[in-house]
Image (cartoon, helix red, strand yellow):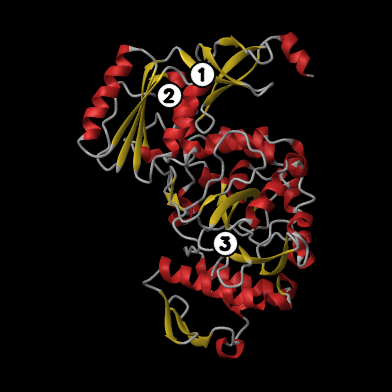
Amino acid sequence: MTTAPVRRETTTPDLLSAFPFPFVDDIYRYSTNVEPANQQVITPAGQWGDSVAVIDSEYRNELAERAAVLDADPTRRAVLPHMRPAAWDALMTMLRELAHAYPDTMHLTSVGHDEWHWRNDLLDDERTFRYGEEASLGDDPLHYLSTQVQEDIALLDQRDDQLFVDAGVITFAADWSFGFDVGMSFLEIHGPVPRVRKMGVITRAHEFLKRLQPHEPYRRTNWTMTIGRRLDVSTERYPEWGPDREMIQHVDDAEFGRLVHLRVEVQHLIRLPDSGAIMFVIRTYLLPLEALATVEPWRTRAAEVFAELPDDMADYKGIIKYRTRASEWLRTHAGHQPSADDNMTPTTELDATQDIATEPTHGLPEWPSRPPEVDAAGSEFLIVAAGAADETAHTARAWVRTAESIGPTRLLVLDSLTHDDDRTSLIDALAATHTGARILVTGGQYDVLTALALARESGAIADELAAFVTDTTDLPVYCAHCRDTFRGVGSPGGVVECPGCTRRLEIHEHHSASRGSFLASAVDARDLEALS
């Protein structure tokens, strides 16, 4: 076996607990996948998403690495002349973000008309400057910002109904060249990405970005894999990291798990208030497979995503040579515990009180044997009863009695979410709920799973959902071939007929919480032949 020439790193607890695991389903396809920023995301390992700027245990290391990259390659930093006002706008926006998120160590104070005092206690950096005057700052604003935050920054100018990447500091690019792309339009830059033109993803993203408003930031995630804890895998440095894709195929399993990292970018999209430019704030997170495998839901889902990813997407991401091995490694390392001398984070255990029905951990929902209690922390309550079963009605009435003693309560009684009118009624009711609402659903398994998926789609998080299933004989089934989702009577391992393509399908032990359905695929040889 080959010994890899990549330095091993310690995965400290905060890097695992704050890791933004990107997969919400077992199948990954390109999408705009944007959501409002500054909203906490609870994960099986911890949480992330509270702020735009994030400081972690790698703060000083990553700032030092950025400085080295910029010293070696000045093309990673550019500000076209018309973007100087946007650079100042970006600096002030991000300094405010830092001061708000870390008030104990980051301080921004107004000391007069357009004069500001900044103090970064972590770096022992303190200066007073006048907005718009580089001489008072002692640096150009975008470069100075890059010495304060771990995030890369790109600034887009909007003109002629298009967006142009006209400024930025990009030191941790994932197989692209900022120096080459400066001045190009957003649509031009994303032209090489497979599928996205045909699917219209980039066009939709472009239109969304043009509609961004100040003080309403959004975010999205993107991912790939990287060999070693290597932040700078830019096109410019391909001769250094490109050979790792061959090397990694020949290392032993232990080394493979240590070296292959899931690489996730959290991209914040912000309309700057003074200049009107759009700021992309790009933070890169790296987690080795051996640390990822300690979080069971992440292990199983990542294995499925890597295995299913179409070849053209895997090739574009540069992982086609080792994605199959990565999937197999994860599948065979359930409950993986790194050895003590690896200095890795121990396995993160899930809270035994977690509501598994709304957040399945092993691909299948597990329903409670009795209705869950109404959460007294709710600000309002939406109770959904689907179907005519006596137990459904009894459960809903009990919830209503309790909820009405706490706050505003609405009961929505439905026949079945197979009916368009009932589905529309639920969507409207979900849209009318406010932050802090609790949504409780009872009925047959099909209706409950479908309702929970619609609730998640409307923005509900796990803590806001509760469910009780009164009949498990039916379930939502997703046909892998015609993409139809329908109500089937059966259970995983059983066979149903798809009403969309008439194929006989086996229901897999594979459930998507976000889609609200079970995967099914053709079971007969004649059906499989029809797919070829």
Q: Is residue 58 visible?
A: yes
Dot 3 amino acid type: Ile
Dot 1 amino acid type: Thr
Image position of 166 with respect to 245: above or below: below
Residue that carries the numbered disc 1 in the rendered image: 418
Residue drawn at the location 19% of the way across and 35% of the way down: 405
Q: Residue furthest bottom?
A: 135
Locate the N terminus by quadrant: top right
Residue that carries the numbered disc 3 in the rendered image: 270
Viewer-closest of 441 and 311? 441
Dot 2 amino acid type: Val
Q: Residue furthest left?
A: 405
Q: CA distance from mark 3 to mark 1?
A: 39 Å
Residue drawn at the location 52% of the way across and 75% of the way down: 92
Q: CA distance from mark 2 to mark 3?
A: 37 Å
Specify which label sits upstream in the sequence, 3 or 1. Answer: 3
**Is label 2 in contact with label 3 (beta carbons under 8 Å)?**
no
Residue at disc 2, secondary structure: helix
Residue drawn at the location 77% of the way across and 67% of the way down: 183
Residue 448's label in the rendered image is 2
Residue 474's label in the rendered image is none
Question: In the rendered view, does 452 fall on the left or right side of 368?
Answer: right
Residue drawn at the location 67% of the way across and 37% of the way down: 325
Q: Is residue 350 visible?
A: no
Viewer-closest of 341 and 59? 59
